[in-house]
Image (spheres, rainbow, N blue to C red):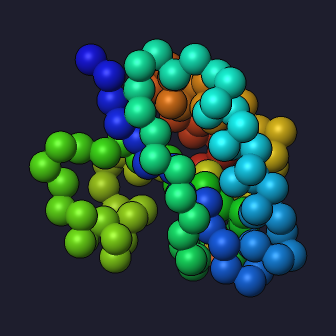
Amino acid sequence: MPKKYQILVCKGPECGDKRHAGDVHAAIAVELKSCPLNGNEVVLERYSCFGKCQKGPNVLVREMKPNENLRMILLMPTAGAGAYLYHLVKPEEARQIVLEHIANGRPLLELTRRK
Ligand code: FES
């Protein structure tokens, strides 16, 4: 059954201006258009800051559930079992994120552990 995912790329001054989070966002947008998603849907957005600027750019990928509390998620998008926050993401990793996590449902745990 197709799933729906949200991808949030931070855009605060530290990651956005100094660590090129915009390039990561643009690369993910390109891959979402070119990669097979296995019928899954994706909402790609920017997010102000995850409070992890020293490990930025940060990319949150989470599965959206039909009955989730959107107000709570807006306040704490990193909460919940289906949320994975990727650190120090490079534009060239966009394809791997889209193919593995979005298309195949396999989160990239090594990207969540980067320091
Ligand atoms: S701006 Fe990226 S985590 Fe703060």
Residue 115, image quadrant: bottom right
Q: Residue at x 69, y 32 (%)?
A: 31
- Give the quadrant of ligand 1: bottom right
Residue nearest the viewer, comparing 107 with 40:
40
Residue nearest the viewer, comparing 60 with 110:
60
Q: Residue at x 61, y 60 (%)?
A: 9
Residue nearest the viewer, comparing 2 with 81:
2
Q: Residue at x 54, y 69 (%)?
A: 47
Residue 113 picture location, percent across and down:
63, 51
Q: Is residue 27 visible?
A: yes
Q: Residue at x 64, y 30 (%)?
A: 33
Q: Is residue 5 left or right of residue 104?
A: left
Residue 96 picture location, percent across and down:
69, 30
Residue 66 picture location, percent across and down:
18, 43
Residue at the bottom extreme?
13
Q: Is residue 41 left or right of residue 7?
A: left
Q: Is residue 75 above or below residue 40?
A: below
Q: Is residue 86 left or right of residue 66?
A: right
Q: Quadrant of the N terminus?
A: top left
Q: Is residue 20 above or below residue 86?
A: below
Residue nearest the viewer, comparing 103 with 88:
103
Q: Is residue 114 visible?
A: no
